Image (cartoon, grey):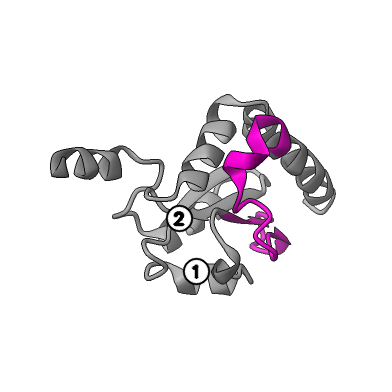
Amino acid sequence: MLMTAVALAVDGPYDESADAKLEIKNALSAPTNTPVVVVFGANWCGDCRALDTAMKEGASASLLKRDFRIIKVDVGRFNKNVDVASSYGVPLSNGIPAIAIISSANKVLYVTKEGELANARKMGDEGIYQFFKRVTASSKVEK
């Protein structure tokens, strides 16, 4: 049983050993003016996994891949990368997954302030798509 739990953590969508600040910096230094969606979550979080699946395979996938770079930031048990979330105004206390959309100039374009994605499993693919359709449309205007 322990092996399975460890395997799940390793196979999860969030790289628990990644340097979040470096990954964001690298995404922002890309030669394009592509905004970045920073997704804060954890491998133990079912809603985070549901959001990740929707972003990779669901209706939202093509929308996001076309117009945004995606960086996933592991928050552990709310004891990792909390400073990164805070620097973008993301209140992790309202639930994960949470996102910040930032411009290529590192300007915050959108933040989930009220835990808008914290119930991603209940939202389902269509609800997640409608969320991203709404927030990305307003974010693209400010590229």
SS for callout 2? strand
Residue 76, given in percent of the width and then of the height, sits at: 36, 61
Judge whether 38 appears above or below 127 on screen.
Answer: below
Judge whether 81 appears above or below 55 on screen.
Answer: below
Which residue type does callout 2 highlight? Val
In magenta stretch: residue 104: yes
Q: Which residues are magenta?
A: 98-127
User: Looking at the image, which is closer to me, 126 or 112?
Assistant: 126
The CA span between labels 2 and 1 is 9 Å
Judge whether 24 appears above or below 71 on screen.
Answer: below
Q: Is residue 85 left or right of residue 17?
A: right
Visible in this render: residue 68?
no
Residue 10, given in percent of the width and then of the height, sits at: 26, 42
Q: Which residue is mark 2?
A: 73
> Mark number for residue 74?
none
Q: Which residue is mark 1?
A: 84
User: Looking at the image, which is closer to me, 75 or 94?
Assistant: 94
Instruction: Please give the name of the residue rendered at 32% of the width and 53% of the height, measured from the top-left corner.
Output: 16
Mark 1 Cα within 10 Å, few/some/many (few <14, many 20+)? Answer: some
Which residue type does callout 1 highlight? Val
Tags 2 and 1 touching, CB below 8 Å: yes
